[in-house]
């Protein structure tokens, strides 16, 4: 049997990740979220090649549902914020509304539909798109009428999130006109029409350079300058998505800074922070990292955040921390 070999080749401005002579990834840097986890006996081969130094372990700590939490908080959808804060199963609650059954009767598949609704409908998605997202994310196939019904129910259940999309759209219109319109939870971000920017708590901006609008009888289409000569379309829901993800990143960046005071942050993937910890202090270290991932900046007062951690000796073979700890103590 030929042992698999891997290499990263520097090819000018781009890097190619090569396995046994075949290119398996090609981008400006290695994109760790694309390393496969499922599909056949070799699914985790690449991830299992990511190992810590001798005498160390990997801690992968994930910021639980952080985008959905930030969105609900920034939109002041207080009932959803409270549900997160009280550690309620918001996916089951959404499924309960969708299927008009008690929460305790929600099945695993119905909960999956509720999960995709919470995570997938927050930025103004329509019925046709939600149908596709539900199939891809949840493995559930519904017709377009049912998808539209679920989208409508999400919006009716979360009217302040829907209002946030409208306010963001109005902000874009004002920005084109050379005026400012603040939106969302007061004091969190600042809109600056002179720079076509939304300034974040970190001091960094979300920029929409050369923002302009094309009008027709039925709609207004906003766009801004992309790379080269291209233009990117923007609308209220997309703007809210940009902002929600940026605010989540602001929080995680501050948490990473605190973690870095004691342990090395090796990488981040989506909302997870991967840390290298000496094996001799893995229990205390993991608890420290989880504490850091629950740190809340002053500007985010009232935002309910939480985290989950996994530990292991390779990036492809991690175990939930509490389960790992229980097995270790037996």
Image (tube, rainbow, N blue to C red):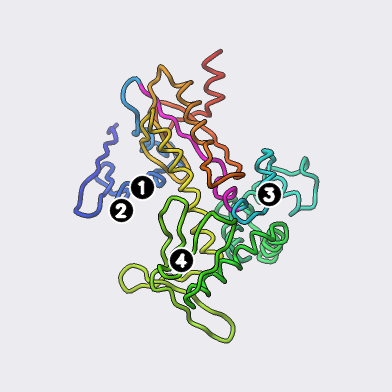
Q: Distance between the residues labelled 2 and 3?
A: 38 Å
N-terminal of the two: label 2 or label 3?
2
Tell me whether circle 2 and circle 3 mark residues in contact (CB < 8 Å).
Answer: no
Q: What residue is pinned by disc 2? A: 27
Earlier in the chain: of badge 1 and badge 3, it is 1
Is label 4 or label 2 in front?
Answer: 4
Q: Is residue 109 left or right of residue 237?
A: right
Q: Is 101 left, or right, of 112 in this rendering?
A: right
- Write the start and end of the magenta stretch as one range: 56-71
- Alpha-carbon distance for marks 1 and 3? 33 Å
Q: Distance between the residues labelled 4 and 2?
A: 33 Å
Marks 1/4: CA–CA distance: 33 Å
User: Distance between the Cα atoms at labels 3 and 4?
Assistant: 29 Å
Camera-nearest label, 1 or 4: 4
Residue for badge 1: 31
The disc, 4 or 2, on the residue closer to the chain's N-terminal end is: 2
* Chain-order first, disc 1 or disc 4: 1
Q: In this view, does 2 lie to the left or right of 92?
A: left
Quarter of the image with the N terminus is top left
Of circles 3 and 4, the one toward us is: 4
One can see residue 134 in this view: no
Quadrant location of residue 147? bottom right
Instruction: Characterize the local packing of mark 1: few (<14), some (14-19) or many (20 or more) Cα atoms within 10 angstroms.
Output: few
For disc 4, the marked residue is 192
Horizontal and vertical percent position of residue 43: 42, 39
How much space separates mark 2 and mark 1, taking CA atoms? 8 Å
Q: Residue at x 39, y 69 (%)?
A: 209
Where does the C terminus fall, quadrant-wise? top right
Nearer to us in this view, 264 or 2:
264
- Dot 4: element: strand
What label sits on residue 217 in the rendered view?
A: none
């Amino acid at each position: 049997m030929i042992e698999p070999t891997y290499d990263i080749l520097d090819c000018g401005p781009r890097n190619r990740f090569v396995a046994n002579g075949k290119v398996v990834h090609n981008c400006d840097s290695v994109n760790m979220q694309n390393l496969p986890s499922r599909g056949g006996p070799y699914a985790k081969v690449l991830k299992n090649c990511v190992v810590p130094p001798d005498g160390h372990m990997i801690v992968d700590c994930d910021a639980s549902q952080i985008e959905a939490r930030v969105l609900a908080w920034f939109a002041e959808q207080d009932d959803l914020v409270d549900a997160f804060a009280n550690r309620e199963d918001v996916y089951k609650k959404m499924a309960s509304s969708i299927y008009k059954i008690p929460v305790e009767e929600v099945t695993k598949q119905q909960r999956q539909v509720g999960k995709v609704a919470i995570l997938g409908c927050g930025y103004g998605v329509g019925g046709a798109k939600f149908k596709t997202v539900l199939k891809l994310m949840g493995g559930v196939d519904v017709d377009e009428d049912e998808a539209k019904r679920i989208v409508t129910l999400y919006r009716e259940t979360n009217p302040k999130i829907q209002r946030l999309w409208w306010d963001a759209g109005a902000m874009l219109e004002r920005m084109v006109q050379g005026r400012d319109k603040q939106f969302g939870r007061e004091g969190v971000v600042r809109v600056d029409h002179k720079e076509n920017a939304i300034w974040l708590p970190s001091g960094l901006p979300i920029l929409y350079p050369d923002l302009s609008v094309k009008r027709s009888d039925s709609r207004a289409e906003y766009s801004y300058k992309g790379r080269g000569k291209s233009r990117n379309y923007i609308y209220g829901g997309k703007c809210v998505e940009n902002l929600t993800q940026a605010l989540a990143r602001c929080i995680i960046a501050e948490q990473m800074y605190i973690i870095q005071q004691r342990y090395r942050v090796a990488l981040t993937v989506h909302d997870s922070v991967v840390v290298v910890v000496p094996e001799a202090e893995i229990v205390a270290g993991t608890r420290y990292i989880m504490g850091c991932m629950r740190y809340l900046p002053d500007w985010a007062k009232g935002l309910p955040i939480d985290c989950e951690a996994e530990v292991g000796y390779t990036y492809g073979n991690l175990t939930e921390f509490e389960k790992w700890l229980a097995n270790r103590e037996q």
